[in-house]
Amino acid sequence: MNKKLNQEEQDKKKLLWFLWLHDYFHRYYTKQATEKEIEIIKNWNPEKLTGSSFEASESQVKKGIEKVWETISAQYGFAAPERQPVKVFRLRQLLPYAAAIVVLLMASATAYQYNTYDTVQSLGYLFSDKMGYQTDKGDVKKFTLPDGSIITLNGSTSLAFVKDEFNSKEREIWLEDGEVFFEVAKNPHKPFIIHTQEADVVVRGTSFSVTAYGELHKSSVAVRTGKVEVRKDNQIHTLLPSQKAIIDKKKDAVSLSQIETSNIATWRAGDLTLNHSDADELLLRMEQHFDIDIKMQPGLLQDINFSASFEKETSLPTMLDVISDIYSVRYTIKNNTVTLYK
């Protein structure tokens, strides 16, 4: 059928391919890839193909994705599936992978020429029916998963799972960005796995919080009940109630600490609790809590270590006054924007 697709339909199809490529990488690094996929990646030589490293601007990445899409669809006659994924992923969240993905497509295009039944089956994930949830800044929403587990999403959060495979042998979720409190239905035979960009979290029945905002240089897992495993770089860190794992993205290290269970995910009740927060986390939390934008003069709030609890009724000016008194900064509020300055 040669009917020309409108731009919206084309964008949806490109997004579906892009999502699959993200999963392609994930399967490799979690040792779930097929032998053929592993061979493709191991023989991949990006320097030889491109003559440059992976560094690319957002505009370059977008152009690269467009070019690769046009080449593959024209050369191999692929038609994207009719079913469309829920739009829970944004391009900016995938940009850390995007330059590498563009090169991988060019390097692995020959894999599509095999055209065998096994190859088609190994690429079947592309046609999976994805289910996703997303919240906007300032929103807190609760959902029930097919296995009976309850998840509460903080603002600016997006996650997804494969509808047909969830609760089969395993219960897998991909937390692409944000923060979620999990109340996992107990099932010792079907582990519940949360994949983030920094680590995997494995449980069978417990309650805990996972924080994985892309804007922050630290992500964390805090346990309220049960036992949780945090898996990173072939190491397993086991957490019990009142324990917290902090993953430092800059240092590529995991540290454990104690935490009061009453301080875990207080945002569910509308409260705001900060524990040893730097400026990035402080501003992000305020933006989420009050649904505002914050601009800050360069050089302010450097190397801070801020801890405080604010109840739901606390107003924005009250919290800003506290910060102003502690760190000797001034502020203005105009429309929906706060400006911090010396």
Image: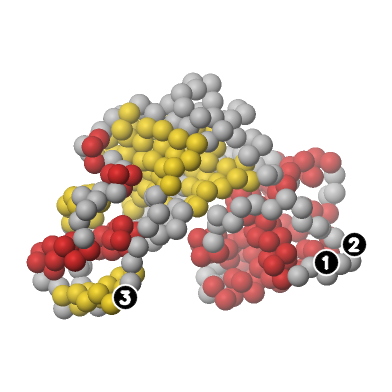
Q: Position of residue 251 (x, y in %)?
A: 33, 54
Q: Nearer the viewer, mark 2 or mark 1?
A: 2
Looking at the rendered structure, the kind of residue marked 2 is Met
Q: Position of residue 111 (x, y in %)?
A: 77, 53
Q: Residue furthest top?
A: 188
**Alpha carbon separation for disc pair 3 and 2:** 51 Å
Looking at the rendered structure, the kind of residue marked 1 is Ala
**In the depicted structure, whether residue 63 falls above or below residue 133:** below
Residue drawn at point x = 83 percent, y = 49 percent = 114
Q: Which residue is mark 2?
A: 1
Circle 2 crowding by C-alpha within 10 Å: few under 14, some 14–19, many from 20: few
**Alpha carbon separation for disc pair 2 and 1:** 14 Å
Q: How is the image coloured?
A: secondary structure
Q: Which residue is mark 3?
A: 335
Q: Which residue is mark 1?
A: 74
Disc 3 on helix, strand or loop?
loop
